[in-house]
Image (cartoon, helix red, strand yellow):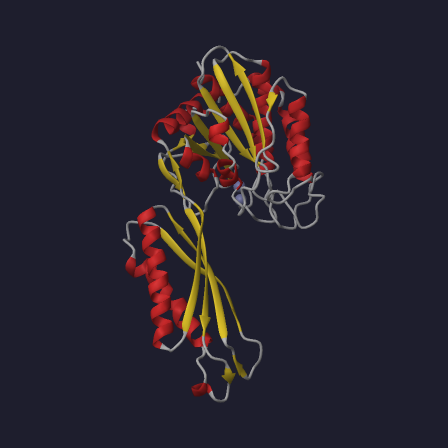
């Protein structure tokens, strides 16, 4: 492993930043203390700090040399509504909120890279450092795009990195093409006719229709999607009824759809509509469907992924690069950024930790210097 010596020497400092951030987790778009903490560190370094974007989003940059080439490195900064169950000297001090996805570590690794590059400006071009809010559910990446990040700044290529439990410390995984799935949600309201449970023939029972609909929707993936493609339709919430003897008027079911290809996604949307309407119609009910596309799929561009791979090889060696890790059905709002700009996203091994979003998860401080070295190496290899 060829980590950058000065970054190894900063290990304690970067780890302190990570643990400080771990203590003050904040939910999407509420990362005020987090952004202030990061900004305080940035103010102590020789970098340009730009006006905040997307509310709590911080963008800093360093320009060196004469080239107009640019590169952007993005970390996410938000936490999750989870009660931390770890027993650490630096646990969450915000009850009900926790850095259970490691964004504290992502921010600290990027700060490590900013600190190093602010002192070692032996590159030619501009690096943008993006501390993005609201990766979880709220689409901070989309907000940055809507607020014109790519028109305010000329960004040639953007890179992202996420820790990955289960991948060994010192290893990275990436691939060209689909890496993370698109994430959509839907609500289906079934409008029946309420009545007395003893007189079912006088009503239109939305609960029976819901039961049939749940089963029928499972056929979309198993019977109506090419088995060589990947897709998930999960029903995750069912709500209806109040009493033992009342057939309710309505029932509501909700769920999520995960896909990699836009064609498959459109087919699933159409199938959900057709199946829901047909089943409801068969029983004399109607339905209202609210389908929302949340995050697009994260698709890595070929050239930038090759560049990420070169940096990984330099830092940890070819043997520690995993190219055949399967894509994840999880999603990532880096997708909004990489949809608008060339870019690539990598996974860095977090070792055998609890899984992401688990109340016992913790970011592995051992990988901070590996991630920061990757960022710096990527910049130096691109801006020459
Ligand atoms: Zn997450
Ligand atoms: Zn995350």
**Residue 368: x %, y % from top left:** 57, 29
**Residue 221: x %, y % from top left:** 33, 58
Up/down of 37 relative to 7, above or below: below
Up/down of 353 relative to 242, above or below: above
Q: Residue furthest bottom?
A: 198
| Res 353 visible | yes
Q: Quadrant of residue 367?
A: top right
Q: How many marks?
A: 0
Judged left or right of residue 199, residue 362 is right
Nearer the observer, 293 or 17? 293
Q: Quadrant of residue 67?
A: top left
Q: Quadrant of residue 210?
A: bottom left
Residue drawn at x 34%, y 47% is: 262
Tell me the quadrant of the picture where the C terminus can be found: top left
Judged left or right of residue 222, residue 20 is right
**Residue 8: x %, y % from top left:** 59, 21
| Res 349 visible | no
**Residue 273: x %, y % from top left:** 36, 62
Residue drawn at x 52%, y 40% is: 143
Up/down of 373 relative to 244, above or below: above
Residue drawn at x 47%, y 65% is: 253
């Amino acid at each position: 492993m060829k980590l950058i010596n000065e970054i190894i020497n900063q290990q304690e400092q970067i780890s302190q930043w990570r643990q400080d951030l771990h203590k003050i987790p904040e939910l999407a778009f509420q990362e005020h203390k987090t952004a202030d903490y990061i900004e305080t560190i940035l103010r102590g370094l020789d970098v340009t700090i730009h006006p905040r974007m997307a509310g709590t989003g911080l963008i800093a940059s360093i320009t060196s040399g004469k080239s107009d080439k640019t590169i952007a490195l993005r970390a996410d900064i938000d936490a999750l509504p989870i009660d931390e169950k770890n027993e650490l000297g630096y646990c969450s001090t915000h009850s009900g909120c926790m850095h259970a996805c490691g964004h504290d570590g992502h921010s600290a690794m990027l700060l490590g890279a900013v600190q190093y590059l602010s002192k070692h400006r032996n590159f030619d071009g501009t690096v943008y450092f993006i501390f993005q809010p609201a990766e979880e559910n709220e689409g901070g990446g989309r907000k940055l795009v809507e607020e014109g990040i790519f028109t305010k700044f000329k960004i040639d290529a953007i890179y992202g990195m996420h820790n990955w439990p289960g991948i060994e410390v010192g290893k990275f995984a990436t691939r060209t093409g689909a890496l993370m799935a698109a994430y959509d949600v839907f609500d289906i309201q079934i409008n029946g006719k309420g009545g007395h449970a003893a007189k079912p023939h006088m009503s239109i029972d939305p609960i029976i229709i819901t039961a049939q609909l749940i089963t029928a929707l499972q056929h979309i993936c198993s019977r109506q999607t090419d088995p060589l493609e990947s897709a998930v339709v999960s029903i995750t919430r069912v709500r209806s009824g109040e009493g033992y003897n009342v057939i309710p008027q309505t029932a509501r079911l909700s769920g999520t759809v995960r896909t990699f290809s836009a064609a498959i996604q459109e087919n699933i949307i159409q199938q959900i509509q057709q199946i829901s309407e047909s089943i409801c119609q068969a029983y004399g009910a109607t339905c209202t469907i609210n389908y929302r596309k949340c995050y697009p799929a994260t698709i890595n561009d070929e050239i930038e992924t090759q560049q990420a791979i070169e940096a990984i090889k330099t830092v940890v060696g070819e043997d520690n690069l995993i190219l055949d890790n399967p894509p994840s059905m999880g999603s990532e709002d880096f997708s909004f950024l990489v949809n608008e700009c060339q870019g690539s996203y990598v996974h860095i091994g977090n070792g055998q930790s609890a899984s992401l979003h688990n109340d016992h998860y913790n970011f592995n401080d051992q990988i901070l210097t590996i991630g920061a070295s990757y960022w710096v190496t990527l910049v130096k290899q691109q801006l020459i």
